[in-house]
Amino acid sequence: MCKTKPARGKGYTAGASCITSVLMNDIEAKVNLDTGAFCTCVGKDYLQVILPEWKNHLLPIEGVQFSSASNNMYPLGILDTNLVFPHPAGSIRVKTEIVVMDNCTSQHIILGNDYLNIYGIDINNHKDRYFTIRENKRQKFSFSNMPKQISIVSSKNDTYKEEFVSNQLVEAQINPSLSPKMRNELINVLYTYNNAFASDNEPLGSIRGHEVDITLNIDRPYPPVLRRPAYPASPRAREALEKHIQELIQLGVLSKVGHNEEVEVTTPVIIAWHNDKSRMVGDFRELNTYTVPDRYPIPRIQETLTQLSKAKYITSMDALKGFHQNVLTPKAKKLLRIITHCGIYEYLRMPFGIKNAPSHYQRMMNTIFPTELSEGWLIIYIDDIIICSDFAILAKSLYRICDQQTVFEMTQERIRAYEKIREALTEAPLLLIPDCNIPYKLYIDACGDGLGQALHQVQIVDEKPVEGPVCYISRQTKPTEARWSAYV
């Protein structure tokens, strides 16, 4: 049925614009979501208005022919840039390669089917016109009613930034000792990459290109031990289990298996309680027994912590439900099916407790951040991330680490826990982090009851040389050793 039927002969007046506003290099630009365009492009004349230095960033393009409905198009090169779609609930950054055309006269950027498809941009024409990006259909972006004059706008003064600070940073606790400049730079980083953080509209990210697969060391038919029944559960546990299942379904982590689907593997689940809080745990022990191991190395904590020796600032990040952000292959989904009193469900994302989950996550993170890891300022231990640097390097590091595919969360509970740990640590003697480029000092002591050694270094702390312990070693003397002389 037509929403509003135009008069006879006036059907062409019912069309509506698919133009919206974006930010490109902190400058407002117009983008036309054109489903009929094969690729994303822009005319050089319009590009000159919004980005005068565009020629300095142009990548070459050769041997490719383009054409529109009426003319041949002549490409000048490719502009590799980001388009930020602003939204009060969290802006979304789209990384694009835009073909710059010599003879394109459009006064906007044409976002073609290439990136409409890559980022899952869907246009809704049913009632209120809007478009969505990726799988989040609740975050609606609006179109411009009429073309507006292009204006140079800094994202720092954008109203969306003010709404972001007042709405999404309400619970964030920013160190009051930061200078106004440092505080503003921090807020700018958080705002620019706000889509890297969890929100009510998009509580869980989705990592593409690193799908999780599971290979078994046995062939079909699988042994009966892999087709296990549901565990008995108390009424309290059943209630908690139903709640967890519904939450995971809403997050897109679980899906109900149809009654007519063939099921070869089922894993029972239990409810684990701690301080009246429940957690659903899959008993994957039998499945892990038949899973081919992935022996990718996990970093050793003692070795990686030596990288912190010269750090003035340390930033700690934790991926929100990091394992659940990893997508499963179709084969892995069929092997990761759980059975409960509610029925059979299959995981769509990687669950906790499977054999190769830590190895897969570590490999994925090392693959995504190879340059940052080799430069030595980034430490990754599965889903825990540490950035170590002085403030100038720190700001640069935050820009490079906060990608849209990665989701981080800073809560009041974690901030309070951090403050308690810091207070407890500063009340006790602190060990210096060893620096292999500085000489060591060895102190030894002995008596009839025990032996003790202390390894020291002189390091620069707050621009002053300070001698402190690197490690302590001690033990009691054995009965025969107690009779020895304590003097050398």
Image (cartoon, rainbow, N blue to C red):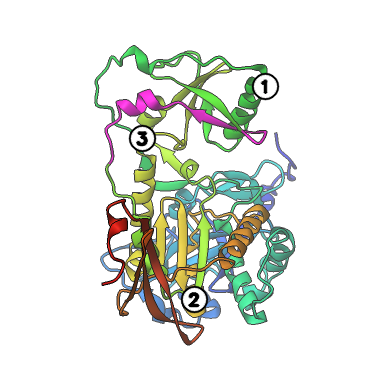
Q: Position of residue 76 (x, y in %)?
A: 36, 73
- Considering depth in this image, is 348 or 230 the residue closer to the camera? 230
Expressed as whole percent of the image width and height from the top left, the position of residue 64 reads 29, 63
- Foreground of the two, 175 or 7: 175
- Tell me if residue 36 comes above or below residue 24 in the rendering: above
The residue that disc 3 covers is 355
Specify the amino acid type for callout 3. Answer: Lys
Residue, x 43% and y 15% (percent of image)? 228
Of 348 and 222, which appears nearest the observer? 222
Q: Looking at the picture, does residue 57 appear above or below residue 112?
A: below
Asked if the residues shown at circle 3 and circle 1 are in contact, with their CB atoms under 8 angstroms apart, the answer is: no
Does the magenta run of residues contain 280? Answer: yes
Which percent across, then down, holds residue 443? 35, 73
CA gap, disc 3 to disc 1? Answer: 29 Å
Q: Is residue 436 magenta?
A: no
Q: Is residue 295 in view from this perspective?
A: yes
- Which of disc 3 and disc 2 is earlier in sequence? 2
| Range of residues picked out in magenta | 274-294
Q: Quadrant of the N terminus?
A: top right
Residue 478 position (above or below residue 284): below
Residue 327 position within the rendered picture, expressed as x and y whole percent measured from the top left: 43, 40
